[in-house]
Image (tube, grey):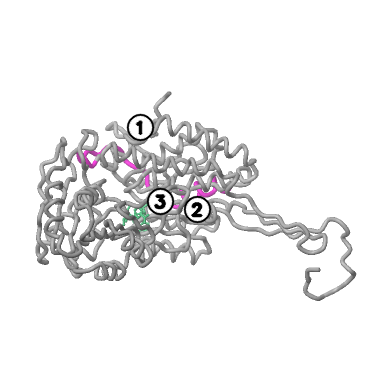
């Protein structure tokens, strides 16, 4: 099977230029603006990315608009076959996509494979679209009058994704959007564009008609163009909270259906009766996996009662044993995505120390297993963190785990519920009653019981509460199907069309 090439052209120095993907082929950018794409493990610039102009936005939306009527009217049987073929191709080439992700994001290969697998699950869910968009029918709602409900696609929809899941987050949305009959303009993060372009080519190979799936690369110009364009009917956004809020407010002000998933600060409560080895292992996995660059990463461990010293000791021993380096070298943890991200995270470690937290493991200045000038911060652990410190109030989005000590379960619950974010949380305990109380009382959208990263399966829906999501619809699952379709109800009378003559009263059912 041939490898998919994501490069469109190379410049004089041999550097690839990545363009947009519009109506089934590369579209060179018209604005003359570019940004660098780097390998974060080495610091090497690996490509330059064309940043969309307003004319590029126009072209991508026009392609999606013109493809819509044909795709909407393509039979469910045929649409489903294409999604199935996409699934088969993706299964066969998942490793290729994972390598692309590691090369631009930096996460270790096994983690990139996991990301692809979670995206594949949504593709599999979308293969069942025929069942998911079935309507209802009522015979004789009134005498010889029947009523049916149908769900129809919206039209051209926009997806705007963050850097930290270049394949999985777009796949939370586009398999369902496409299967339901919409056409898509995907605006990936400018830091990690290749996965989206690779997926676009895979769709073409699967037989998707040109213009149904388009990729628009770029920055704020592209995002603003999509948010205000009258032909874009909905926006699915994932990213940081300030931009999510902006996207929600701007998109809805322009009449669009918007789901905007934002940032997070996820807590893991460890009760005194918990298995502390299990809790320490999972704190490490959830705190340092993907170098903490996950919206479901645990960043605050809340130790309840007298176990805190023991728990901190067990986490610290594990943290120092992790190998940090190039994701292609079987390390445990890779780099941060950019030099700016590394400096920001290191700045928070400086601040935590200055604010009086106990720095138990210091990841600054770590020697990583990598060549070149990668953007590394090693696993970092703070103890005695309090809720007024910036390492607690801010989303660090790096490999920094903070331990907060509280006396009781109620203190832990109060602390979590007072936090402005509400994406994910977990409780570690052997007490079923305590776990039952927690899942009932905690104000967070996704809850784990002895599971640190409770990402819902594709057939449930993914979404946080409070500042972690703007809008009322979560991603994928039946909520995703609902988001990408709108309802229509048809009332019809065929037999005996007599209506009893002229009657200006409101119709009553008889
Ligand atoms: P980001 O908000 O910087 O960027 C997200 C998208 O918005 C990108 O496509 C980017 O090009 C665009 N963008 C950035 N600045 C913009 C601006 N001023 N105007 C318009 N568009 C703009 O986020 P990121 O750094 O790429 O991703 C990390 C963030 O995403 C973290 O906060 C993380 O918690 C969050 N995230 C949340 C979830 C979730 O499900 N809630 C999932 C993954 C990531």
Give the mark count: 3
Q: Earlier in the sequence, mark 1 or mark 2?
A: 1
Cα–Cα span, label 1 and label 2: 27 Å
Report helix, strand or loop for mark 2: helix
Residue that numbered label 3 is attached to: 456
Local crowd size for mark 3, using a 10 Å CA cut-off: few (<14), some (14–19), many (≥20): some
Q: Is residue 427 above or below residue 26?
A: below
Q: Nearer the viewer, mark 2 or mark 3?
A: 3
Closest to the observer, 496 or 439: 439
Q: Residue at x 9, y 64 (%)?
A: 354
Q: Is residue 36 magenta?
A: no
Q: Which mark is residue 480?
A: 2
Quadrant of the image where one finds ligand 1: bottom left
Region in magenta: 40-65
Q: Nearer the viewer, mark 1 or mark 3?
A: 3
**Residue identifier under label 1:** 95
């Amino acid at each position: 099977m041939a490898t998919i090439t994501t490069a469109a052209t190379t410049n004089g120095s041999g550097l690839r230029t990545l363009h947009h993907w519009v109506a089934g082929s590369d579209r060179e950018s018209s604005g003359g603006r570019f940004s660098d794409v780097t390998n974060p493990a080495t610091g090497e610039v690996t490509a330059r990315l064309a940043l969309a102009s307003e004319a590029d936005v126009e072209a991508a939306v026009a392609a999606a608009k013109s493809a819509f009527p044909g795709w909407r009217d393509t039979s469910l049987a045929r649409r489903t076959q294409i999604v199935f073929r996409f699934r088969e191709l993706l299964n066969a080439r998942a490793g290729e996509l994972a390598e692309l992700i590691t090369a631009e994001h930096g996460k270790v290969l096994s983690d990139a494979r996991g990301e692809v697998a979670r995206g594949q699950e949504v593709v599999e869910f979308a293969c069942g679209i025929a069942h998911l968009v079935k309507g209802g029918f009522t015979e004789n709602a009134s005498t010889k009058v029947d009523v049916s409900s149908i769900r129809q696609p919206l039209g051209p929809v926009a997806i705007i994704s963050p850097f930290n899941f270049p394949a999985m987050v777009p796949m939370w949305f586009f398999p369902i959007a496409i299967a339901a009959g919409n056409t898509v303009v995907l605006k990936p993060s400018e830091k990690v564009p290749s996965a989206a372009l690779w997926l676009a080519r895979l769709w073409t190979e699967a037989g998707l008609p040109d213009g149904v799936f388009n990729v628009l690369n770029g920055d704020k110009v592209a995002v603003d163009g999509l948010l205000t364009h009258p032909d874009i009917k909905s926006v699915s956004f994932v990213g940081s909270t300030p931009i999510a809020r902006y996207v929600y407010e701007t998109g809805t002000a322009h009449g669009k259906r918007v789901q905007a998933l934002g940032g997070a600060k996820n807590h893991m409560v460890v009760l005194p009766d918990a298995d502390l080895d299990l809790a320490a292992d999972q704190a490490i996995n959830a705190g340092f996996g993907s170098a903490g660059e996950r919206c479901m990463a645990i960043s605050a461990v809340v130790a309840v009662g007298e176990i805190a010293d023991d728990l901190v000791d067990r986490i610290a021993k594990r943290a120092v044993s992790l190998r940090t380096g190039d994701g292609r070298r079987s390390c445990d943890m890779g780099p941060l995505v950019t030099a700016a991200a590394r400096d920001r995270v290191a700045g928070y470690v400086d601040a935590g120390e200055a604010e009086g937290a106990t720095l138990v493991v210091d990841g600054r200045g770590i020697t990583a297993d990598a060549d070149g000038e990668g953007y590394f911060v090693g696993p970092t652990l703070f103890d005695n963190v309090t809720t007024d410190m910036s390492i607690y109030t801010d989303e660090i989005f790096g490999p920094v785990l903070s331990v907060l000590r509280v006396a009781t379960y109620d203190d832990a619950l109060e602390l979590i519920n007072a936090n402005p974010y509400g994406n994910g949380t977990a409780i570690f305990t052997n007490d079923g009653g305590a776990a039952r109380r927690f899942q009932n009382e905690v104000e967070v959208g996704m809850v784990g019981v002895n599971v640190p990263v409770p990402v819902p399966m594709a057939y449930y829906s993914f979404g946080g509460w409070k500042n972690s999501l703007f809008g009322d619809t979560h991603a994928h699952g039946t909520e995703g199907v609902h988001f990408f379709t709108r309802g229509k109800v048809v009332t019809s009378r065929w037999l005996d069309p007599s209506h009893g003559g002229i009657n200006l009263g409101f119709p009553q059912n008889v």
